[in-house]
């Protein structure tokens, strides 16, 4: 593992070329028949730990070399990334990590010497590959890596090398696919027509044919995809072989694999410019999904499968009627999703917070109460929300390991967010989902613990009518002069407890006020149509898409982001869309999101007046 501070020398980098003098660095793996570096890691780690247990033996040449090779063989192998085929096996939130290839940049010569002398082909492949990766001038090591990877594949297939978790048939493992992918990747870089690269290309064709003959479904997908990617075999031949496999499916074949094979066949026919065969394969994939939907007892899973089938039929000229039928089937299936939904309740005691709010407002007059009401809470900084979301995802990776489908009350999927991803950068939509979840909880706390108690105590102690709000709003630069009475009516309804009336009055006014304030600051909030020579006011969506920087400059980023999360984004309640299209239920205006939304608009009305309270 890496030492915490960046200036400290990593434990695995203490080894020097002099440490190799007279040392058989393969001693720990002399009896190993491991087919991958995972098996070598255990041997070198055990050897290092055995020396560490002996006094003064932890800093001997042997110990330093064992640590060096332990770290090298523990690199995370990811050949699909041609530029970074190796990465750290572990990264902690505090920055501590395991080894990466760049750590060995000062040991290239040592890697080359070891690669030249080792007899273990798995270790030779790792040494040669990392050395060539760090110094592309060492082309011989690149070709050695290719040849060695191909040798490993052959030895796996005949059973000379084994995996730690072996199955009955280890001939066609995903590791073999990865080795071949890496060999081809190196071949593309050093020379596609070099003998070693040509051997890798031929191995690809031969492997694909062997897995097709064995009818090994998943390996068929791996190696056929790889062949299609590198273009070694004729696309039509690949598609034909896939159909042959699909015509002789073994019992119990997974529908996911079958669908993937039909999709791959369609892709191959597309490459071959055989559209009718492509459409036929797409239809087969779609019908496989529909059949599986009919076999499942879960309405949510069935609806997902039918939706996938509809998407599969996209672009097929003769499938219009079938798509329409499946859309009707989808709607019927989605009607049953609500029966599968469960409500999870996490109780939060907000009584102490609510009482504190009541006690604070009780001695105040009406004017002061309204201004205090406007500052009960503040919109959080977007950078803080994003940082906290990333930290939560890192601390609890299982919570974001899968993507999410967001359903409406009728079971329709209205939005999707991606999974967080692996060890690298987190997918932005996963961060947004985490922020949305945290903000939903915050809005609930603010609405139930602050806004509603404050509204009640203010209403109980003071008579609130339209004219009181109008008297204040006439001075607010957020309220257009010709809408003062409408704003006053909306907030009179809100404080009186008519949240339905308040939400439906105030939500449309927000868009107009944003345009009004931007115009006051000299910005053009219209769209000019050159063809018709007409102008239209920008919608709130257009303002956020085209004038976000101007909004941030006027309202500040925390407020514009808060408005976005409450009224616009599909990760949140999306109240603007729901109100505009009549999608809310009777109970929705009395929920925490709606209460917070009305309060947020009230806050926007009074914030510009806060500096002038005493005047």
Image: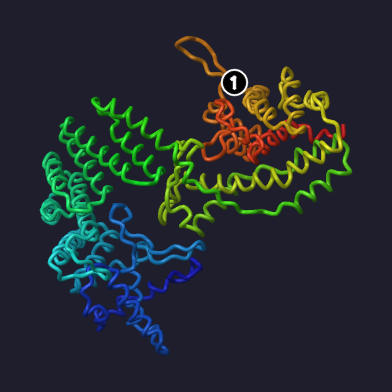
Res. 584 visible in picture: yes
Name the spot of residue 419 as percent of width and height, x first. 43, 49
Q: Nearer the viewer, residue 167 or 321?
A: 321
In the depicted structure, whether residue 36 falls above or below residue 287? below
Q: Residues within 10 Å of mark 1 (few under 14, many from 20)?
A: few
Q: Secondary structure at mark 1?
A: loop
Q: Quarter holding the N terminus? A: bottom left
Q: Which residue is mark 1?
A: 524
Name the spot of residue 394 as percent of width and height, x first. 49, 57
- Left or right position of 486 against 246: right
The answer to which image quadrant residue 263 occupies is: top left
- Residue depicted at x 44% and y 47%: 427
Res. 190 visible in picture: no
- Residue depicted at x 52% and y 63%: 94
Q: Nearer the viewer, residue 154 or 571?
A: 571
Name the spot of residue 601 as percent of width and height, x first. 69, 32
Name the spot of residue 203 as percent of width and height, x first. 12, 55
The residue positioned farthest toward the top in the image shown: 532
The answer to which image quadrant residue 283 occupies is: top left
Q: Quarter holding the C terminus? A: top right
- Left or right position of 542 against 292: right
In the depicted structure, whether residue 556 falls above or below residue 45? above
- Residue depicted at x 68% and y 37%: 595
């Amino acid at each position: 593992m890496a030492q915490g501070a960046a200036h400290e020398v990593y434990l695995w980098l203490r080894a020097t070329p002099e440490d190799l003098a007279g040392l058989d660095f393969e001693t720990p793996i002399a009896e190993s028949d491991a087919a991958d570096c995972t098996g070598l890691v255990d041997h070198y780690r055990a050897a290092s730990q055995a020396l560490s247990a002996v006094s003064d033996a932890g800093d001997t040449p042997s110990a330093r070399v064992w640590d060096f090779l332990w770290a090298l063989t523990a690199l995370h192998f990811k050949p699909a990334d041609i530029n970074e085929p190796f990465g750290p096996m572990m990264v902690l939130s505090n920055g501590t990590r395991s080894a990466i290839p760049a750590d060995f940049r000062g040991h290239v010569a040592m890697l080359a010497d070891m690669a030249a002398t080792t007899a273990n082909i798995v270790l030779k492949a790792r040494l040669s590959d990392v050395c060539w990766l760090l110094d592309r001038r060492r082309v011989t090591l690149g070709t050695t890596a290719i040849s060695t990877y191909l040798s490993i594949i052959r030895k796996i297939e005949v059973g000379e090398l084994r995996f730690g978790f072996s199955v009955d048939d280890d001939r066609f493992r995903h590791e073999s696919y990865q080795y071949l992918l890496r060999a081809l990747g190196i071949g593309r870089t050093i020379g596609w027509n070099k003998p070693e690269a040509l051997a890798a290309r031929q191995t690809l064709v031969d492997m694909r044919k062997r897995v097709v003959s064995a009818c090994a479904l998943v390996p068929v997908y791996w190696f056929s995809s790889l062949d299609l990617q590198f273009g070694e075999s004729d696309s039509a031949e690949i598609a034909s072989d896939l159909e042959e496999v699909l015509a002789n499916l073994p019992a119990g074949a997974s529908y996911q694999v079958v669908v993937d094979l039909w999709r791959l066949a369609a892709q191959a026919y597309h490459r071959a410019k055989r559209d009718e065969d492509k459409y036929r394969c797409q239809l087969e994939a779609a019908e496989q999904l529909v059949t599986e939907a009919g076999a499942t007892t879960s309405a949510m899973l069935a609806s997902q499968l039918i939706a996938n089938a509809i998407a599969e039929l996209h672009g097929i000229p003769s499938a219009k009627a079938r798509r329409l039928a499946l859309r009707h089937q989808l709607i019927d299936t989605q009607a049953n999703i609500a029966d599968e939904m469960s409500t999870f309740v996490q109780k939060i005691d907000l009584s102490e917070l609510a009482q504190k709010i009541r006690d604070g407002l009780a001695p105040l007059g009406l004017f002061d109460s309204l201004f205090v009401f406007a500052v009960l809470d503040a919109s959080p900084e977007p950078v803080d929300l994003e940082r906290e979301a990333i930290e939560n995802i890192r601390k609890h990776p299982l919570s974001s390991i899968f993507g999410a489908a967001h359903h409406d009350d009728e079971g329709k999927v209205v939005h999707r967010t991606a999974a967080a991803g692996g060890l690298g950068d987190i997918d932005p939509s996963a961060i947004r989902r985490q922020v949305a979840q945290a903000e939903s909880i915050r809005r609930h706390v603010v609405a139930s613990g602050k806004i509603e108690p404050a509204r009640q105590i203010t209403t109980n102690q003071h008579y609130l009518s339209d004219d009181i709000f109008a008297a204040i709003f006439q001075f607010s630069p957020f309220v257009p002069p010709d809408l003062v009475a409408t704003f006053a009516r909306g907030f009179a309804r809100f404080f009186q407890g008519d949240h339905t009336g308040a939400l439906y009055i105030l939500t449309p006014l927000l868009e107009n006020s944003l345009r009004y304030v931007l115009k006051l600051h000299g910005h053009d909030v219209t769209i000019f149509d050159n063809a018709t020579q007409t102008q239209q006011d920008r919608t709130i969506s257009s303002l956020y898409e085209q004038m976000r920087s101007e909004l941030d400059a006027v309202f500040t980023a925390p407020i514009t982001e808060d408005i976005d999360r409450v009224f616009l984004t599909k990760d949140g309640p999306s109240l603007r869309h729901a109100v505009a299209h009549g999608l809310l239920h009777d109970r929705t205006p009395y929920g925490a999101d709606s209460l917070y939304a009305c309060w947020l608009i009230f806050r926007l009305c009074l914030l510009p007046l806060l500096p002038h309270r005493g005047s």
